[in-house]
Image (cartoon, grey):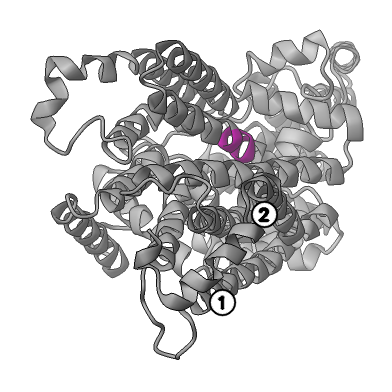
């Protein structure tokens, strides 16, 4: 092997062997990766919760707080906000048991989990790169160790990871990532022990259990059986690109071992769809057609690759633009780029199988969130890159390995390893600096949505959320300006109408407030909060009969809300209907006694 190494490289190989000895690599490299990742994400520890699902999931949610039987029962049966994620809830409950509602504890856990994922990816990359080698240098080769470390750090320190780590709600990303990586590790170990049936079975059992834990943390890992097949092609070489060989008798064991993985993936996919349907998160074909879904798929497939290569202009929200179409120039370019990369990698698949496997892994893991089943206002999201872009990091490690093992002399005249190493270090430092800066945008709700508007001033969703936050700070004029901007962009946004109406009522502009509450009700006749708020304004205007009608309609839509009963009782009392008023006051007291207190407003809309 040393005969193929340049003279300068050969002379220093002994020193490298000392520096990166087996015992050193076993602990020093993983510890360094863990420490570097923690350092890059250190600013997160001073961040607050943000009013973007953190409010609904954590601040106003009493159910996850603790690890008692009631909390555990809720965690394993709820579709709160849509996802089924009992293990993620369990870790959040554990955080509460230790830290209460101090955000620092939740952020510490996220950072530690992400740093552990960086170490896990290091070990997975070492295994993958070793299996991909055409010789027998093994996992302890210094080139493999450095290349695997580079892959792990490219993944861990990339600013695309910030959303998953800095956002407390996205505990599911970092937790599922940990189980997912060790699932891959166990599967690779099982296949490398194919001559030892007992050991192989044990590793496969471990892989299956870890896969269950992955799905119990976040269901988007449902495409893992596809990943298993891709690994069988490269680097395991149990299958080939010739599909005809997949169904010969010798391949039966390859498919038999995957049956249980496929079965649980189907079960959790069904659970995920059910959860989204329960919160009405899935967009109908009527409101979001096939052409738009195809456009979102093409755009998303290229977006994460592009942002991996050019990680600037990252935003907490990339809102679906108005009149989004398959024929938009950006979508057409993205679609052509996706097809071009796919065709090119397919044509050279025999010479570079790892390239096509990594690309197909990327697409397969992205598939559940590309927009075929669209949910939410986002076109794409940084957090969706967490699992999918691991293969791109492994490719980066493979590229470094290629150069480290080659005899290429850099044009600037430096020794090859020195130039290559300096480039790799520069990339890592650059990514870490970008990540450090990106964490600042998640400092609090105001910095978050201000950043979103810097990237896209036409984001109605960002205007709406920023308005909600600054209104609570008493900056009503500024909040109203953002609500009006949101309504200019999305005139049929019932929530913005409702909340703007509240601020106008607070300022004493009652007629304007009534117009906005009426507008909210026209958009959504079943909008209980708008009916309730309209009733309160009617009371202030002396229109008590109309107020009673509004409160009664709100009560029909939300019968278990104490505040509606109380206000209806007050309106009835103004009309002299004291007996009926007393019944509603009693109902309000019963509800208050039976419910745990929350911070959720009955009047203001939240997302």
Nearer the observer, 335 or 523: 335
Q: What residue is pinned by disc 1?
A: 422
Nearer the observer, 599 or 23: 23
Q: Quadrant of residue 267?
A: top left
Determine the secondary structure under disc 2: helix
- Where 27 sits versus 299, above or below? above
Left or right for 112, reference 570: left
Q: Which residues are magenta?
A: 172-178
> Is there any visible trace of residue 53 in the rendered image?
no
Rounded to the nearest angstrom, the CA distance separating label 1 from label 2 is 43 Å
Indicate which disc residue 465 carries.
2
Q: Residue at x 50, y 33 (%)?
A: 185
Indicate which disc residue 94 carries.
none
Nearer the observer, 277 or 204: 204
Q: Main secondary structure of the magenta part?
A: helix
- Where 404 sits versus 123, above or below? below
Determine the secondary structure under disc 1: helix
Answer whether residue 573 is magenta in the image: no
Instruction: Measuring from the top left, give residue 352's x and y in whole percent.
Output: 24, 54
Picture quarter with the N terminus: bottom left
Instruction: Measuring from the top left, give residue 451's x and y in whole percent.
Output: 65, 67
Q: Residue at x 51, y 23 (%)?
A: 211
Q: Earlier in the sequence, mark 1 or mark 2?
A: 1
């Amino acid at each position: 092997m040393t005969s193929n190494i340049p003279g300068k490289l050969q002379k220093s190989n002994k020193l490298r062997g000392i520096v990166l000895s087996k015992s050193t690599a076993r602990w020093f490299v993983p510890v360094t990766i863990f420490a570097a990742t923690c350092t890059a994400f250190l600013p997160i520890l001073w961040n607050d919760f943000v009013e973007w699902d953190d409010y609904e999931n954590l601040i106003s949610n009493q159910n996850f707080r603790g690890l008692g039987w009631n909390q555990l029962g809720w965690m394993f049966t709820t579709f709160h906000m849509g996802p089924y994620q009992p293990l993620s809830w369990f870790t959040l409950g554990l955080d509460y048991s230790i830290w209460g509602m101090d955000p620092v504890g939740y952020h510490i856990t996220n950072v530690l989990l992400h740093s552990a994922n960086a170490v896990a990816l290091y070990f997975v990359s070492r295994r993958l790169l070793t299996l991909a080698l055409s010789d027998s240098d093994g996992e302890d080769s210094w080139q493999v160790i450095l290349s695997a470390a580079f892959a792990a750090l490219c993944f861990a320190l990339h600013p695309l990871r910030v959303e998953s780590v800095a956002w407390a709600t996205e505990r599911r990303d970092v937790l599922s990532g940990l189980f997912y990586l060790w699932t891959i590790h166990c599967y690779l170990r099982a296949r490398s022990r194919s001559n030892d049936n007992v050991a192989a079975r044990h590793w496969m059992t471990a892989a299956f259990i870890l896969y269950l834990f992955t799905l119990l943390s976040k269901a988007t890992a449902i495409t893992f059986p596809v990943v298993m097949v891709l690994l069988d092609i490269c680097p395991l070489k149990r299958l080939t690109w010739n599909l005809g060989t997949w169904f010969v008798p010798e391949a039966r064991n390859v498919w038999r071992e995957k049956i249980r993985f496929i079965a649980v993936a189907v079960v959790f996919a069904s659970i995920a769809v059910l959860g989204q349907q329960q919160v009405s998160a899935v967009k109908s074909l009527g409101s979001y057609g096939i052409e738009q879904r195809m456009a979102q798929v093409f755009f998303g497939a290229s977006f994460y690759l592009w942002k991996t290569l050019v990680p600037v202009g990252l935003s907490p929200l990339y809102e679906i633009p108005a009149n989004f179409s398959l024929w938009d120039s950006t979508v057409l370019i993205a679609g052509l780029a996706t097809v071009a990369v796919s065709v090119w990698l397919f044509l050279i698949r025999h010479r570079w199988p790892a390239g096509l496997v990594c690309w197909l892994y990327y697409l397969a893991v992205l598939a559940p969130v590309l927009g075929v089943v669209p949910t939410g206002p986002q076109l794409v999201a940084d957090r969706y890159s967490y699992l999918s872009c691991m293969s791109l990091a492994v490719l980066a490690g493979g590229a470094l390995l290629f150069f480290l093992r080659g005899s290429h002399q850099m044009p600037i005249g430096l020794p090859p390893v020195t130039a290559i190493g300096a480039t790799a270090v520069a990339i890592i430092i650059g990514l870490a600096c970008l990540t450090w800066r990106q964490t600042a945008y998640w400092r609090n709700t105001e910095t978050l949505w201000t950043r979103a508007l810097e990237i896209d001033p036409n984001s109605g969703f960002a205007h709406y959320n920023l308005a909600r936050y600054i209104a609570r700070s008493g900056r009503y004029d500024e909040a109203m300006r953002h609500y009006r901007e949101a309504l200019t962009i999305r005139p049929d946004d019932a929530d913005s109408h409702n909340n703007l109406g509240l601020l106008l009522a607070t300022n004493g502009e009652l007629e304007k407030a009534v117009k906005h509450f009426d507008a909210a009700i026209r958009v959504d006749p079943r909008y209980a909060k708008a009916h309730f708020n309209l009733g309160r304004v009617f009371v202030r205007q002396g229109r008590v009969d109309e107020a009673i009608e509004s409160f009664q309609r709100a009560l029909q839509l939300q019968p278990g809300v104490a505040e509606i009963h109380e206000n209806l009782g007050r309106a009835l009392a103004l009309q002299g209907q004291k007996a009926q008023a007393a019944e509603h006051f009693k109902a309000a007291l019963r509800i208050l006694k039976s419910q745990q207190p929350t911070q959720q407003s009955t009047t203001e809309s939240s997302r």
